[in-house]
Image (cartoon, rainbow, N blue to C red):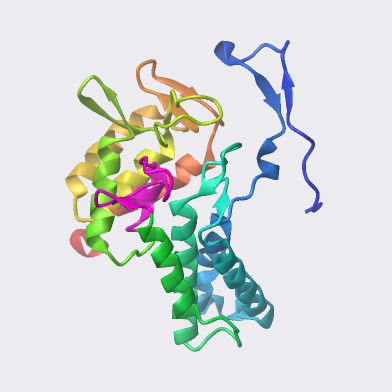
Amino acid sequence: MCQSLPLPETEHANWASYQGGVPVRSHNQAAEHVQNDAYGEMILTVTPIFFDERYVDLRTKDLDTLLAYLAKLCVRSIGQPDAGLWEIRNGWQEHSFTNLMCRAGLERLERIKQAGHLGPISLDLTSARIHAADAILRGVQGGALRNGPTDFSNDAGLSQLPILGYPNRELCESTVLHITREPALRRGSEDTGFFYRYVREDDFGKPEAAFVICSFWIAQELARLGRTPEARAILDQVLLAANHVGLFSEHFIPATNSQWGNFPQAYSHVGLINAAFAVSPPWSDVL
């Protein structure tokens, strides 16, 4: 890694583009964004090292030091404005998703510590987790977790409450079901199985295309909540967004059956794999 920012994002006004989409840009302004959910996500990524004996050689003092540092960053990020999961360019605010990821990371560190791992750490992890949980609850309205305490719109990213192990099942289920109604992408009153990330305006106006991984998230979470038939119905619909060789893009417009955004999009395929496992019967049922 060169540890330097990429070149500035540039618009190319005179360049031809795919199906007339404008403007054409090179590079990405996202390098300038603060996305504090990343700290909790990094903790989640390395947590299996401490609970799977195949990774015992990776349990090092350096990893302990890194986790202690990430814990401090999680605590520092709780309740702070950032660009959020979706890399909002302007109007940064406190995001429930960031608070949720901070809580998830801190809770995993508690479990690692209780399992007898993790070196000395100056933080009271339990108090830090409770602080994050209190921040999450500030974003609850109408029984569902919303984008944040100053913006009570729905956000499909928050459908991940169940898979992140949030302990309030009622809030998990209510949030997921709210999201299945909005930001659902519909044809009239007909469900399509596709979802916008959100329907609020952002830096580019209101979203026009579904975000493919949102459908896979929601299918996965519905299955986790015991609503497997609904999850499979969504998955069956979304599989139609693949191209002739089974690849998914970042965005999809069902009305025109057209793929948009990054292609192929790894994020979408990870979502497909997780959702497919979630809706599949356990091995004990088929062997």
Judge whether residue 160 is colored magenta. yes
Quadrant placement of the N terminus? bottom right
Residue at x 43% of width, y 46% of height: 150
Q: Is residue 162 left or right of residue 29?
A: left
Q: Is residue 147 above or below residue 129?
A: above
User: Which one is nearer the viewer's eye here, 153 or 227?
Assistant: 153
Q: Which residues are magenta?
A: 139-162
User: Which one is nearer the viewer's eye here, 65 or 147?
Assistant: 147
Residue at x 49% of width, y 55% of height: 98
User: Which one is nearer the viewer's eye here, 28 or 103?
Assistant: 103
Q: Is residue 252 above or below residue 124?
A: above
Inspect this view and state whether residue 259 appears: yes
Q: Position of residue 125 (x, y in %)?
A: 49, 79
**Dominant secondary structure of the residues highlighted in magenta in the image:** loop
Total numbered circles? 0
Q: Is residue 270 above or below residue 77?
A: above
Q: Quadrant of residue 237?
A: top left
Quadrant placement of the C terminus? bottom left
Q: Residue furthest front?
A: 150
Judge whether residue 167 is colored magenta. no
Inspect this view and state whether residue 279 appears: no
Q: Is residue 12 above or below residue 117?
A: above
Residue at x 61% of width, y 76% of height: 68
Q: Is residue 194 left or right of residue 119?
A: left
